[in-house]
Amino acid sequence: MGTQAFSWLVLAMSVAAEVAGTIALRYADGFSRPLPSLVVGVSYAIAIWLMAIAVRHLEIGMAYAIWAGGGAALIALTGVVWFGESMTPSRAIGVTMIIIGVVVLNLETR
């Protein structure tokens, strides 16, 4: 696996860690529950560490756009699927706009 491909894989793992931390945040109950609170802290620390590794070989603006946008879109979809939140038209448009924004930013860097 090449350096570029490895960096993309690490970025994807960083997004997954950030999403896991955000899901755990829901269960941490304002950081009053120790185990979910620990999962939040560890997940976010891993996400930042992996992002630091990924940006060694990826453009930081593009990597952050994918990390932030991908994480936001995944959390919105997780809320709908896992927590039974409604998929309103405005939420669907918002997730679509996030994805379009990330694509446009990636086109700009080429």
Image (cartoon, grey):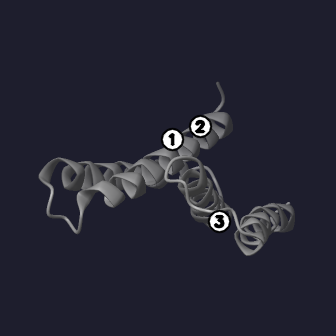
Q: Residue at x 73, y 72 (%)?
A: 94
State the separation of the CA atoms marked 2 and 1.
Answer: 6 Å
State the separation of the CA atoms marked 1 and 3.
Answer: 15 Å
Q: Vertically, is 59 above or below 5?
A: below
Q: Label 1, on which residue?
A: 13
**Three-letter amino acid code at disc 1?**
Met
User: Quick check: 74 left or right of 30?
Assistant: right
Q: Which quadrant of the figure has residue 26?
A: bottom left
Q: Label 3, on which residue?
A: 65
Q: Position of residue 48 (x, y in %)?
A: 40, 56
User: Quick check: 38 left or right of 45?
Assistant: left
**Three-letter amino acid code at disc 3?**
Ala
Q: Tag 1, which secondary structure? A: helix
Q: Label 2, on which residue?
A: 9
Q: Residues within 10 Å of mark 3 (few under 14, many from 20)?
A: some
Q: Position of residue 31 (x, y in %)?
A: 19, 64
Name the residue furthest bottom.
Answer: 90
Name the residue furthest top.
Answer: 1
Q: Residue at x 29, y 55 (%)?
A: 27
Q: Are marks 2 and 1 in contact (CB under 8 Å)?
A: yes
Q: Position of residue 89 (x, y in %)?
A: 78, 70
Q: Residue at x 23, y 69 (%)?
A: 30
